[in-house]
Amino acid sequence: MIFNKKTAEKTAELLLQINAIKLNPSNPFKWASGWNSPIYCDNRLTLSFPAIRNYIRDEFSKQITEIYGKPDVIAGVATGAIGIGILVAEQLGLPFVYVRPEAKKHGRQNQVEGFLQKGQNVVVVEDLISTGNSSLMAVEALKEAGANVKGMIAIFTYGFAVADENFKNANVNLNTLSNYENLLELAVEKKYITEEEQATLKEWRESPSTWEV
């Protein structure tokens, strides 16, 4: 769900400007899942651009407060959302924890790193939503640790139907600064891609696991 159309457009433009999102319909990328994809998104690049990371920090902080109220703790999903999550927690004057993909095999065997008390209200920060599986695993780990997860906020989502279904089934609220629809509209308007390439990108989103050039 997009909270603010103007923010969605500006976020998409900033991500395109720094090549955090790359669009290449004629020479697709190969994802770790094996999917062929005309788009690649690496939002960790935003941390290298102070003005952009501060914009994302400010928008996250504002939307978290407006949508969920001020939580007790901000949680970042490792590893992509740790950096921006810390910035948001600092901006809001809140404690920060992060969630590993799985519990450590040694030491205290934590999956949630940091100080978290049972019953505390937590908002989860994520950088990117694809299927939503890894993000929702982090939510589940927080719940198992006793947190009251108010919802999740992410920089960008591909908007896959499977992700919508996964979040709905998990009863987790998701808001994003920008999404695939806003990205494609802006990319055509700013001539990052042609209308023909836009059609290809829309086609991929309908069936990403079977799409071929």
Image: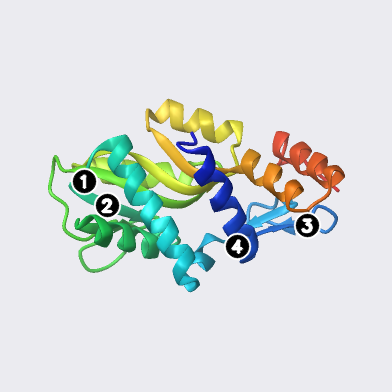
Point 20% across, 64% down: residue: 108
Badge 2 or badge 3: first in the primary sequence: 3
Q: Position of residue 207 (x, y in %)?
A: 73, 36
Q: Disc 2 designates what residue?
A: 74
**Left or right: 138 in relation to 209:** left
The residue identified by callout 1 is 145
Circle 2: residue type: Ile
Residue type, mark 3 in image? Asn
Nearer the observer: mark 1 or 2; the answer is 2
Give the total number of marks visible in the rendering.
4
Residue drawn at x 81%, y 42% as measured from the top left: 200
Q: Earlier in the sequence, mark 2 or mark 4?
A: 4
Q: CA distance from mark 2 to mark 3?
A: 35 Å
Q: Secondary structure at mark 2?
A: strand
Q: Which residue is mark 4?
A: 20
**Tag 3 residue:** 24
The Cα atoms of the two marked residues, 3 and 1, are separated by: 41 Å
Q: Is residue 11 above or below residue 87?
A: above
